[in-house]
């Protein structure tokens, strides 16, 4: 397939934009800049635009370390959304696979692939989400068993699924959930008469933040994409 056509079908660039990107030296094939729009791309070639490798499907899969104060929405008139921080990623179908509260920091998955995000967030798909938290009053050892047995949250008809609590210090813990009910961590601590004052998501399934700093994002590897 011609390079300009390849770009137009594997990214959200139009053919005109693709041609411009090639002309201005922003497109590389197997690591070398190519300025010939008609260059033939073979199935095994790795094509990148602005240093970003294009996926065979044309879909985008990102992980971001969200800062506090940024909302998990695709658009907002007044507040910063995670999508506002994704420089260079303009795919019109980009959306968040599993939201965090405005004051929660940490791992957020962002994709243009609706089927994939459905799998990530489906209640039928078991996927561990690991949170670090701080609470206003000391965390009691008794929470461990209560969370492991499941608790009934207000306005819910079913117990929460077994969750693993690891108490780290008097007021900090690591909590592993396999579901994602609305405000779940805060509501679980609320049900214990406690209150979460800081919340951070460390991982979702096999995806971790590794060394991503707050506000930074990266593309998922193919193995991470396939792990869901
Ligand atoms: N649980 C919460 O209460 N808030 C989050 O942001 C994520 C999980």
Image: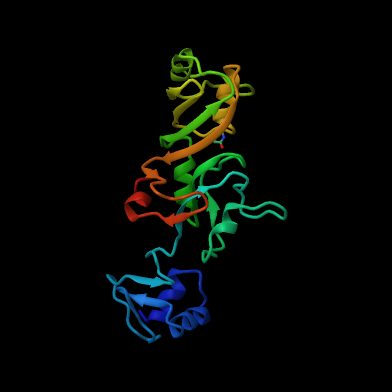
- Residue 146: % across, % down: 48, 15
Tell me how the rendering is colored: rainbow
Q: Quadrant of the N terminus?
A: bottom left
Where does ligand 1 appear, by image quarter?
top right
Which residue is found at the position 38% from the left and 80% from the top? 3
> Relative to residue 45, is residue 25 depicted above or below?
below
> Relative to residue 190, is residue 70 depicted above or below?
below
Q: Quadrant of the C terminus?
A: top left
- Residue 172: % across, % down: 49, 26
Which residue is found at the position 42% from the left and 40% from the top? 203
Which residue is found at the position 40% from the left and 69% from the top? 51
- Residue 198: % across, % down: 56, 33
Residue at the far left in the pictured view = 44
Left or right: residue 185 compared with residue 40 = right
Left or right: residue 74 compared with residue 215 = right
> Relative to residue 24, is residue 7 depicted above or below?
above
Q: Is residue 206 visible?
A: yes
- Residue 111: % across, % down: 49, 54
Q: Is residue 162 visible?
A: no
Which residue is found at the position 43% from the left and 50% from the top? 212
Residue nearest the observer in this picture, 202 or 89: 202
Residue at the far right in the pictured view = 78
């Amino acid at each position: 397939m011609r390079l300009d056509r390849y770009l137009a079908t594997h990214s959200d660039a139009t053919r005109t934009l693709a041609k411009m990107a090639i002309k201005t030296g922003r497109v590389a094939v197997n690591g070398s800049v190519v300025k010939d729009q008609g260059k033939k791309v073979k199935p095994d070639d790795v094509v990148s635009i602005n240093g970003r490798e294009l996926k065979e499907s044309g879909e985008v899969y990102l992980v971001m370390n969200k800062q506090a104060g940024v909302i998990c929405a695709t658009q907002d008139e007044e507040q910063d959304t995670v999508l506002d921080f994704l420089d260079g990623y303009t795919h019109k179908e980009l959306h968040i696979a599993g939201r965090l509260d405005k004051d929660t920091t940490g791992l957020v998955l962002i994709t243009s692939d609706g089927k994939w995000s459905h799998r990530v967030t489906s209640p039928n798909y078991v996927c561990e989400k690991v949170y670090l938290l701080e609470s206003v009053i000391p965390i009691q050892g008794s929470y461990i068993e209560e969370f492991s047995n499941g608790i009934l949250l207000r306005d819910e008809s079913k117990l929460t699924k077994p969750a693993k609590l690891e108490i780290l210090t008097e007021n900090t813990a690591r909590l592993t959930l396999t579901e994602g009910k609305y405000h779940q961590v805060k509501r679980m601590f609320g049900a214990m008469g406690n209150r979460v004052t800081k919340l951070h998501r460390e991982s979702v399934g096999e995806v971790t933040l590794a060394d991503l700093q707050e506000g930074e994002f990266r593309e998922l590897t193919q193995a991470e994409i396939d792990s869901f």
